Image: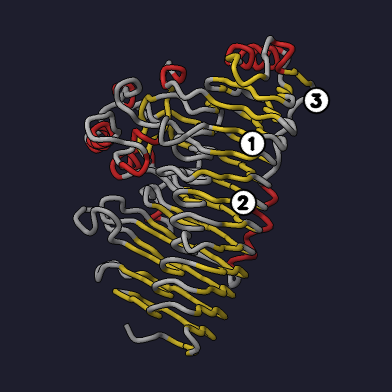
Amino acid sequence: MHYIAKTARGGPSVSWSSSMQQQPSSSPSDPWDQVPAILARIQPPTIPARDFRLDVFGAVGDGVKDCTEAFRAAIAAASEADGGRIVVPAGDWLTGPIHLRSNIELHVAEGATVRFRTDAEAYLPMVLTRWEGVELYNYSPLIYAFECENVAITGSGTLDGQGSNDTWWKWRDKVKFGWQPGTPQQKPARLMLFILGEHDVPVEARRFGEGYWLRPNMIQPYRCRNILIEGVTIRNSPMWHIHCVLSQNITIRKVTVIGHGPETDGANPESCRDVLIEDCYFDTGDDCIAIKSGRNGDGRRINVPSENIIVRNCVMRDGHGAIVIGSELTGGVRNVFAENLEMDSRNLDRALRIKTNSHRGGLVENIHMRNSVVKSLGGEVVQVNLDYEEGDTGKFTPIVRHIHVDNLVSQGGKIGLQLKAYERSPVQDVRITNCRFDGVEQPFELRHTQDLHLANVTINGITYNGEPEA
């Protein structure tokens, strides 16, 4: 595909790749004026109007018969016909991994549930994927597309990853998710993967899969363009639910994501460009939306940011954060616009969170949130944390700048505004305007900020204008 180039070590690079820290920062007087141009570039894929019913290819929707081969046959037939729609009718359809191709739509009709097998060997052979920001070969994601154009997942049915404490989730090294001492866990392989990434071991040699216990993600378009995920309910992924990687022109619309396992994030665009997430419902065991761009040395090797991302009209319930930037953000994140959000759960920790450290590095800039309501919250309303996980023990100083939150009303939480940065790299140009944070235990926690502006900000009944004392 013309927008993909291969590096000498086999890693991908995308045409908009560049070192963000070398680019001058510029923004119009009203950054939201950029949104119409971004939306104009985000267009739904074009899928030929041909239907291929799954049951015609030998599938039986009884929840017992394995329909993996029927999915493969239907997708192959549609591909040979230059594209079309795989229709999953009402019923309970058990399957292994589904690999989409260009010009293919997976349509899960009302009353249909696609239920994914929980035996790990079903997700072999391994495929190229990205796991917590590092490339490797691992179990196939449950729904996977590689270097495709025009792919879609639609319908009002359900995709059920069947993650539970009895299946995938017990690979996490936590008793509360079903793990027991002496049983397999992901921790050793996770550490090994990160070491391989730091030492620039060729991706081809990073082969995990069977015996390594790294859980696959649920939906992963990888190096794709023109993607639509609309209408479906997505439940109980082994790990991250929707994980678009190195892709562009992405629409995620009217999707319901529910899953309370470990690292069961809702939507994680990673090193992606031109993304619209709208009218969705998230109730998750980790971040609702987490925007990423690679981890540490491997993130610097690929060096592709996530940029031009619009989130609007979504509801967030449980989760570590509603809108989260990081922690795998080595390639950088810029131009994020979030508006008209409703957040409501004591189990939702933060409304807006940016997390990194001096191992990740990365440049985060031009992050905007407005016109949103937090009905209840458990942690920080707005947080920038440059001490996440390893803290300031690396050689790659992150930069965070140009953060604007306007008309955010919240109730509850521990801290209203928490900004924790480094003396050599303060958080720059943070503007909080027309906001009200009620019922927080502590208004501010500030460490190393530059150009912090408050205008008409009321916290626990006290109105702030200008810059507060740390």
Q: Is residue 221 visible?
A: no
Above-or-below relation of 423 to 98? below
Mark 3 touches mark 2? (CB < 8 Å):
no
**Looking at the picture, how far across and down is residue 435, in whole percent?**
55, 78
Residue ranking furthest to the left:
393
Which amino acid, by three-letter code, is at mark 1?
A: Asn
Query: With 178 as the anchor, is 250 left or right in this view?
Result: right
Residue wearing tag 2: 281
Residue wearing tag 1: 226
First along the sequence among labels 1 and 2: 1
Disc 2 crowd, CA 10 A, few/some/many (<14, 14-19, 20+): many
Query: With 437 as the anchor, is 74 left or right in this view?
Result: right
**The disc label shown at residue 236, or none:** none
Instruction: For mark 2, give the secondary structure.
Output: strand
Residues under labels 1 and 2: Cα distance? 22 Å
Residues under labels 3 and 2: Cα distance? 29 Å
Of circles 1 and 3, which is in front?
A: 3
Residue wearing tag 3: 49
Which amino acid, by three-letter code, is at mark 2?
A: Tyr
Of circles 3 and 2, which is in front?
A: 2
**Looking at the picture, how far across and down is residue 267, in whole percent?**
53, 45
**Looking at the picture, how far across and down is residue 171, in whole percent?**
34, 33
Disc 3 crowd, CA 10 A, few/some/many (<14, 14-19, 20+): few
Which amino acid, by three-letter code, is at mark 3?
A: Ala
Front-most of 97 and 35?
A: 97
Q: Residue at x 57, y 33 (%)?
A: 160
Query: With 177 as the anchor, is 196 left or right in this view?
Result: left
Disc 1 crowd, CA 10 A, few/some/many (<14, 14-19, 20+): many
Above-or-below relation of 293 to 430? above
Q: In the rendered image, which quarter contains the N terminus?
A: top right
Q: Residue at x 27, y 31 (%)?
A: 189
Q: Residue at x 66, y 58 (%)?
A: 313
